[in-house]
Image (cartoon, rainbow, N blue to C red):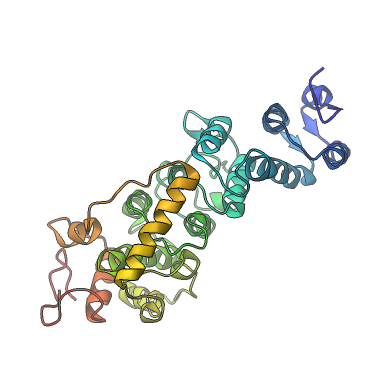
Amino acid sequence: MRVVKSVAVEDFEFRGSIKGSDVTRLKKAFAEDPHIRENEAETLLRLNRSCPIQAPTWSEFLVDAIADYILNQSGPEGYITVEKSRWLIAKLASEGWIANRAEFDLLVAILGRARWFPLSLATFALEQVAGAVVHGFGPLRPGQGPLAAQGVPGTIGEAEVALIRVILQAFGGDSALPLTQSEAEILIGVNKVVAGRNAPPAWTDLFAKAVANVILAENGYAVPPRQVALRPWTAVDDPQTTLEEQVAASLAHLRYDYHTQSSEERALARLERQRIEIVTGEEIAAEEGGWLTERLLSSHRPSAIESAVLVHLDRECLIGEPGRRLGVGLGGYAA
C-alpha cells in the first residue's frame, strides 16, 4: 500500500479530496517522524494534483512539508542547489508550465525561505508570471480570482506585479546583487506587451527601479540589496500625473541608496557572486558590459518608462560624463 508517514493516501485519491482531518493525520505523522523522503515529497505533490477538493489547511501543510524537504533535508541546509532546482522544476512543471496555483505558491514560498538558489530557478518563476501576462494562460490566469481581474493577454494586475517583485527580491538573499540580464530581459519583454495598456502604477514603479538598478550598476555604482533597490514606493495614482513624474517619484531615493563603487567593493561583489555560484552549483552567465545602456541609447527606441528613467538619471547627473549630458534625443524622446 502506498503510504506517507504511515497514513494511507489511496482514500484521498479515490474520493478526489483532502479533508481537514486528513491534514491533521498527516501533520501528526510528520511530527512523529520529521524526516521526509523523496518518494514522500513526490506523493504529496501527486496528491495536490489528484485531489482538486482541498481543505483550507492543506496548502500551508504542503508548502511547509516540501520546503522542509528541499531546504533542510536534502542538503545543503538552507540552500537550493542546481540539482534540487531541477528536481523541483521537473515535479512542478508540465511542458514548461506549472500545473496549478497551489504549486506556484509553493515555488514562491520556497524561494522566499531559501538563502540562495540558482538563477535558473528565479527566471523559471518569473517566466510563469510573464506567461500569464503575455499569453493569458498558466496557473495565475485560471479565469477567476483577483489575478484574473485583468485576465486578458497583454495586461498586468497589481497582484502579478507584487509576485514579480517578491521573486526578484528573493534572488541573491541579502547580497547586494544587481539584476541580471536574464531577469531584466524578462521584465523588458513584459513591459513591451503591457506598455500603453493601462498598466497599474505599481508596474511603472517596479520596472523603473529595475531599469535604474541595471543602468547604475553598469555605470560603476554599488547597488543596495534588492529589498532596498526594489522596495515598493507609494505610487502616484493621480490621472493628472505624467509618466515622467511617476518615474521621478519612484527614483527619488537613488542618491541615498546607490554610491560610486570602490575597487574594494567591486572585488567583494565578484566574490559574493562567485560564492552564490559555488553554493548553488550554477554559474551566473557573464553579461556584456553596458548591454542595457547601449541598447537604450542605440537606434532601438526605448519604451516610455525606459526613456523616462534615462532622462531622470541624466538630469540627476547619475550617468553620462560631466559636460556631455545625454540631453534630448533618447530614442526620439525629449528630455
| Rendered position, 294 above or below 127 | below
Q: Position of residue 169 (x, y in %)?
A: 49, 60
Does residue 145 appear in this view? no
| Rendered position, 69 above or below 272 | above
Check the picture and name the quadrant holding the C terminus. bottom left
| Residue nearest the observer in this picture, 238 or 129 | 129
Tally the numbered discs.
0
333 left or right of 162? left
323 left or right of 140? left
- Report the residue at 24% width, 70% height from top: 310
Q: Position of residue 102 (x, y in %)?
A: 64, 42
- Report the residue at 25% width, 68% height from top: 219
40 left or right of 301? right
- Report the residue at 27% width, 69% height from top: 220
| Residue nearest the observer in this picture, 164 or 270 | 270
| Residue nearest the observer in this picture, 60 or 156 | 60
Picture quadrant of residue 53: top right
| Residue nearest the observer in this picture, 331 or 182 | 182
Does residue 270 appear in this view? yes
Q: Position of residue 144 (x, y in %)?
A: 60, 46
Q: Position of residue 129 (x, y in %)?
A: 48, 47
Check the picture and name the quadrant holding the N terminus. top right
Picture quadrant of residue 31: top right
